[in-house]
Amino acid sequence: MRLRTITPWSCAPSVSGPSIFSLHRELDKLFGDFLGNAAAPGETTRQWQPRLNIAETEQAYLISAELPGVEEKDITLELHDGLLSLSGKREQKSEGKSINYHRLESFYGEFFRQFQLPETVQADKVEAKFKNGVLEITVPKLAEIKPAPRKISIKAD
């Protein structure tokens, strides 16, 4: 199974012009601003989605999630029936001061991401590391089992 099973779409960056990813970011920003997805002044929590990078090597799928300001204790990573779920919460730190924001682009509150992993992974060997606000998840692939060459004897009638 290919990487497309764990990503919503696959697209290589275009040298000739903007990629689908930059279009997606611009549409998110446009609709986010228009529909009010950015927190309004005085509002501090809203569900958000951390930015992810998903890569593939011959041995594993590599997923990194940007979680600045999130503490390790506030992250939950679960794998159940091939679904990898990442959830948690980022709290806004308050020093007891009353602050009036004119624009708040940092998101606080709960987050959730979920991926269907291919059947060709070693679910019991998934590892995760959290350092400097980045969660790195390694999902090893199953080793391809190739039958060993063997000599077949020929019997005479």
Image: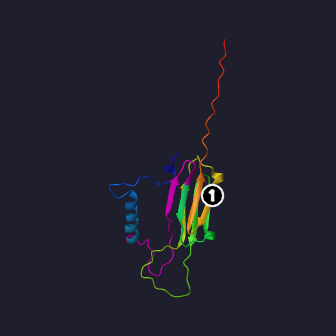
**Residue at 37% across / 61% down in the picture?**
23
Task: Give residue 144's position: percent from left, percent from top.
Answer: 60, 41
Residue at 38 percent across and 57 percent down: it is 20
Residue 103 sits above or below residue 66 on the image: below
Residue under the point 62% across and 39% down: 145
Instruction: Please name the residue that numbered disc 1 is placed on.
Output: 127
Q: Tell me the magenta residue range.
A: 34-61
Q: Any magenta on residue 116?
A: no
Q: Predominant secondary structure in magenta? A: loop
As drawn, the residue found furthest toward the top would be 157
Q: How many labels does the image show?
A: 1
Indicate the quadrant where residue 15 lies.
Answer: bottom left
Q: Amino acid under label 1?
A: Glu
Q: Where is residue 122 in the image (x, y as percent from the top left)?
A: 63, 49
Using residue 133 as the reference point, say whether residue 37 is left or right of it: left
Residue 107, percent from left and from top: 49, 73
Q: What element carries label 1?
A: strand
Which residue is situated farthest in the left direction here?
Answer: 16
x, y percent for residue 104:
45, 77
Q: Looking at the image, which is closer to me, 6 or 128?
A: 128
